Amino acid sequence: NGGSSSVTMFVSLQPVEATDDAFWDQFWADTATSVQDVFALVPAAEIRAVREESPSNLATLCYKAVEKLVQGAESGCHTEKERQIVLNCCRLLTRILPYIFEDPDWRGFFWSTVPGAGRGGGDEDDENARPLAESLLLAVADLLFCPDFTVQSHRRSTVDTAEDIHSIDSCEYIWEAGVGFAHSPQPNYIHDLNRTELLKLLLTCFSEAMYLPPSSDSSNANPWVQFFCSTENRHALPLFTSLLNVVCAYDPVGYGIPYNHLLFSDYREPLVEEAAQVLIVTLDYDSSTSSSPTVDGTTTGTAMDDVDPPGPDNLFVNYLSRIHREEDFQFILKGVARLLSNPLVQTYLPNSAKKIQFHQELLVLFWKLCDFNKKFLFFVLKSSDVLDILVPILYFLNDARADQSRVGLMHIGVFILLLLSGERNFGVRLNKPYSVRVPMDIPVFTGTHADLLIIVFHKIITSGHQRLQPLFDCLLTIVVNVSPYLKSLSMVAANKLLHLLEAFSTTWFLFSAVQNHHLVFFLLEVFNNIIQYQFDGNSNLVYAVIRKRNVFHQLANLPTDSQSIQKGLQRKKKTPEPISRTNSQDGVSMEGSRPAAPAEPGTLKTSLVATPGIDKLTEKSQVSEDGTMRSLEPESSQPSPEGNPSSAVGDGEPWSREASHPRRDRRRLSSASSSGQWTPTPDWVMSWKSKLPLQTIMRLLQVLVPQVEKICIDKGLTDESEILKFLQHGTLVGLLPVPHPILIRKYQANSGTAMWFRTYMWGVIYLRNVDPPIWYDTDVKLFEIQRV
């Protein structure tokens, strides 16, 4: 076939004139190729050989391929032959671009101008020449709205009167009904396939980001994304809308017919995946460095708010932040929830429904929606629909907890819950009874969504992969944030919280790392919030606190002398297990669940940059009497000693290996030994022990323990139901210290998380694109590819 001959030409290392059309046309004339063929026929070694030995040929090839795309976009691709040429150029560029990006000497090539490719149409003035990248991106945008190629033609007649591609209003050709567009076009699998190939090329253009190492400098925006999402792209709005609607309208179960996906190939799914990936990459925008793109405008007649400020230059971010209609929010939320729940849809017939694989992209998209559009976030929390997002996230967290190749998935799930937990409504929504029985490897319980969340978090902490330890602060911060609103915890969840306190308050754990005691502070804050604000419905928790009262007494009497500290640390050597998994009575797991499995050996994974510490991730807000929140100024004026819980928690490692700010955070009270190894000292232990917030619990124990003991003696009771009944009707009004103000730690955007999202997102995209393997075996710098 013609393909193999074009490969031998590819090897031609003799320079070939750009004008030799007969030679260059052979590259795209072949009729029967697929993108997989192009990858097989053009091996990496040969692309690199041409790049090194015959750079002028590689340059000409790229220039010619872009020229063909531009011509196709100009002409409107009316003939089968033109469409074939466009698709072949698309595939060839998808194959070659990563090899251009991996070589720093070539990286500027697409941003240089090519003689004769003027911006001004016929004008040959080189001053006006467009960089090759711009011509390529604009051609792809035009081709994505090309009648009879990627969209349905609105004309009913012959080729002569075919639409002029420059006069069409692409807003009338949006691919799917949804946000800002009511008409759902007739499905056409050829159009879906062609869109998918063009989006693959677009994603490959954007992937230059993979070839730059992670850096704290967020100003290095991706020039491809920047141009594509600017006003230069006249299709920016319809394309943004098309991508969003195609993703949110997709229903993988089809028409509810079991096994349907085994009979019919689903052409929509590859398009939806590609659309989701292109969408999250275009939305890669560091909101912490600019004024927030969210605007609160009054409702206008359009799908987007037309209110100043204009927001960021990136139009996709701008449009996303300005969606405001209730029905649009409903459409997006329902779509994302439907797709996230898809892997959980367990029917009685295994494999009867199609299982989607792009939940990580969906989680990134949901994160962007909440982060860039505060009205969407409030809409999500307004009804119990938020639970349709919560349950799948808890399912993924529980399922992935033992698998080191899915640490990134664990982080994004926890980040989303941290963002949601900063809003009072989230805590309130958690009180809804949990009745959906998604098979999960957790103990059976009867209770609310709050119980589910606590039980899953306990499972992650006690039986997750050790790489999850940096997330413990985040997990407990979420529990603290929701605790003032939890009306009634089940006995199972109450016992889990006390088991965590028991594990975290052993002397070896407290003395073995500089920030471990923060976890105890978080848990005490949870108990205090529930006792002070929700005592009435929480007899289970009060009972659990009474039963485990010795843990609180031990904390209050924690030894601080050097000898005891050393003895505490000795114990660590005997018990290497980070948290004992024994004395937590787990009971039977739910029916139909499988235990969380570790990664299969050989699984590929991509490295991630470290995330900022919880003190960088969040800022404190105080809840006033009327429920409104006000931000608390960080007490940065005077350095607070380590262990002062008010000096927000944790010394978060700088997120990047390069970050070189002076270590002002290294605490004075923890004496660092000459080896640079931190060692606990009596002063250090004292500094935080004196601040343990134990007063409320000690008062509760002082009042209730004698009463409970008296009941037991009087009635000869060993039965806890009587005690619970007594506690249900007990009251501590007037006996407890004055309630403390509720503190919420709200997520705040920062460049550290922006960089984390960038590396995570591209890592997911790298690993998910295996057919064809677009970036495989190229010299990626943003992350390392590792085998488990």
Image: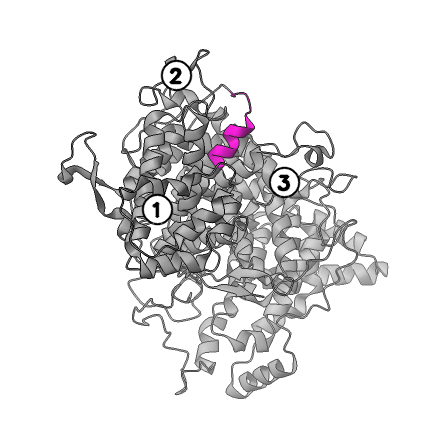
Q: Which secondary structure dominates the residues rendered in magenta? A: helix
Task: Give the residue drawn at x 44%, y 11%.
Answer: 157
Q: Secondary structure at mark 2?
A: loop
Viewer-nearest of labels 2 and 3? 2
Q: Are marks 2 and 3 in contact (CB under 8 Å)?
A: no
The quarter of the picture where the C terminus appears is bottom right
The answer for how far apart the CA atoms under marks 1 and 3 are is: 29 Å
Q: Which residue is mark 1?
A: 287
Query: In this orientation, which residue lies closer to the viewer: 396 or 297?
Result: 396
Residue 584 percent location from the top left of the image:
72, 64
Residue 787 placement, left or right of 575:
left
Earlier-in-chain disc, 1 versus 2: 2
Q: Which residue is mark 2?
A: 162
The answer for how far apart the CA atoms under marks 2 and 3 are is: 43 Å
Q: Secondary structure at mark 1?
A: loop
| Residue type, mark 2 in image | Ala
Earlier-in-chain disc, 2 versus 3: 2
Q: Is residue 694 visible?
A: no
| Residue type, mark 1 in image | Ser
Which numbered dot is residue 779?
Answer: none
Residue 263 is a magenta residue: no
Residue 461 percent location from the top left of the image:
61, 62
Which numbered dot is residue 341?
Answer: 3
Residue 192 percent location from the top left of the image:
52, 31
Q: Secondary structure at mark 3?
A: helix
Q: What crowding class fits label 3: few (fewer than 14 Cα within 10 Å), some (14-19), or many (20 or more)? A: many
The answer for how far apart the CA atoms under marks 1 and 2 are is: 43 Å
Residue 672 percent location from the top left of the image:
40, 82
**In the depicted structure, whether residue 155 falls above or below residue 58:** above
Q: Is residue 46 visible?
A: yes
Which stretch did the figure color magenta? 184-196
